Amino acid sequence: MKKLLTIFIAFVLFTFLSTRMNAQIRIDGVFFDWTPQTQLDVPPNNVELTFAQGDPDAPDPNNPSYFADLDIDDVYATDDADFVYFRVKLNSIANVLNIPNDTSYHGGAAIAVYISVDPGVSDTTGLTWGWWGNGYDFFIQVYPGDSVAVANTLYDQFIWEHTQTGNGWDFIPADTLIGVKVAWNAENNDVEFAVPKLKLFNPHFMPNFTIPQNIAVMVYAGENNSPWRADYASNAGVAGYLVQMKNPGPISVDGLFFDWDSGMQLDVAPNVDELTFAQGDPDAPDPNNPSYFADLDIEDVYANSGEDFVYLRIKMNSIANVLNIPNDTSYHGGAAIAAYISVDPGASDTTGLTWGWWGSGYDFFVQVYPPDSAMQVNTGYPQALWEHKQTGNGWDFELADLLRGCWVAWNVDNNDVEVAVPRVLLFNPRYLPNFQIPDTIAVMIYAGENNAPWRADYASNSGVAGYPINVVVTGIDDPLDNSLPKEFKLSQNYPNPFNPSTTINYSLPVAGFVTLKVYNLLGEEVAVLVNEEKSAGNHTTIFNAAGLPSGIYLYSLSTGFNKETRKMILLK
């Protein structure tokens, strides 16, 4: 067992360039979250062969190990609402770190992914490949490293955008601050990276561009100087592998609000109705002058939930305008508007909306006013998501993620704002041990001053207990299959290895009392994740091992008739 753990530790030590990128794919150089369904070079697509398997790009077919550092083996891609993720698996007999020392390469070498965002028969800018350099709209280089991007941005590589001038190498950075996170496992010659859709789907040189249902990609690994020997991974005719993009969510965060309806309103019976100051809200600073402070007068609160986001809408008093706030000297230190979220509300909640002192009562918050200019410039997201560290201090919080935040759109004329909060951050908290994805979360809205006397308007249920929001999303995996599981099953956790949180799925063909426990290799119980009645169906829980040392752990699922145990690796 100790030997296995040592192997995994060594495995990760070879990873250079890693980050905590919360998403469908973690950009960490470990690759356990990639599935066979995300592989592109499988039938009916062209299968990318190694040189030893007969790839026609082999520089020396009689010596397939020659040039193997740049021998593409497999290509993977997938996406979520905000990113397109790629994995390029090169020949595992080699190592990308050998390239600088191999004098047989002319001018060194580069590995890059070329992307068309408008592929198809009518494409005049994308993967037409009359001369292949002209055939892409963007490219991302994953080798060699970009020291300028690392020194001046939060990212590892720039996104390079084609200017569509007919010159294959006429490109510029799509953005000087927002780029691509890259993680290598150099020992296995394997790399993964995340490309923000914000940049891919807002091209500067493609008039009348519309967001596509598919993009197309080609992978290049080759020399920097002639004779330009290279390996290519693509479909026949260099047409590119198609990657289908997922459909948009139920709410467009655009400040227009046409996709909100009355059924999404939270402040209606049986919840507490949020009143304006003129309607008698007890939070009114001056009941005799209800227009005073109206810029911060909350009128209504809405919520909805999708596969990728929890959506909130905060309708402020329409007689006012949030843009008036900086000019109103009656506010002490300006003002802020924010949504405070508990992801574990309920009678047994000791971290969320208990509100002994309300600042201690939330797990996350997102501010919708004032803007966060640093987050906007460095990531493209208008606001960050802030995570409470559960230390008992209401203001002891940190960024939930350095590169992923919240989408926010204001209609200032109507004093109305909508926000999309990523579920992948909300439901992977770092400071809630043994967290399980809930059916319901709770939210409170705050609009008030930044300094004493802290006058503010609050929208919440009585006792500041928060409005409940149902976050159960159904029909994502297979909308046509509503049948119950046919067998008792405990799935392998993912990611694995993990640090500090991992997801565990299990299936129950019948309802019953269920326990899910974690043990160390001495057989000592270290966590109880589930210990209650559960309905028949598929279930998910999160195991947070923040307080445990690195090592191999066992997790065991038991009912009255079945028991199954699996191994997982915590690697800090």
Image: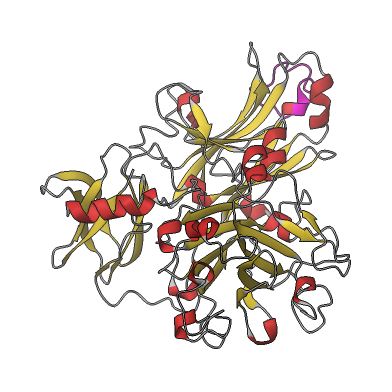
Quadrant in which the C terminus is drawn: top left
Pinpoint residue 486: horizontal percent, then vertical percent. Answer: 29, 78
Quadrant in which the N terminus is drawn: bottom left
Pinpoint residue 179: horizontal percent, then vertical percent. Answer: 66, 50
Q: In this view, does 421 lie to the left or right of 297?
A: left
User: Residue 383: which quarter of the image?
Assistant: top right
Pinpoint residue 101: horizontal percent, then vertical percent. Answer: 51, 57
Q: Is residue 185 left or right of residue 450?
A: left
Q: Which residue lies furthest to the top in this view?
A: 453
Which residue is painted at 72% across and 34% down in the image?
373
Which span is picked out in magenta?
278-295
Q: Does residue 71 belong to the magenta stretch?
A: no
Q: Residue 57, relative to residue 20: is it above or below?
A: below
Q: Is residue 274 left or right of residue 167?
A: left
Q: In this view, does 407 lie to the left or right of 497?
A: right
Q: Residue 274, relative to residue 29: is it above or below?
A: above
Instruction: Using the rendered image of the protein, determine whether residue 81 is visible from the camera's viewpoint.
Output: no
* Residue sitting nearer the eye, 298 or 502: 502
Which residue is painted at 13% across and 63% down in the image?
560
Pinpoint residue 460: horizontal percent, then vertical percent. Answer: 56, 34
* Residue sitting nearer the eye, 2 or 455: 2
Q: Does residue 284 belong to the magenta stretch?
A: yes
Q: Which residue lies furthest to the front in this view?
A: 103
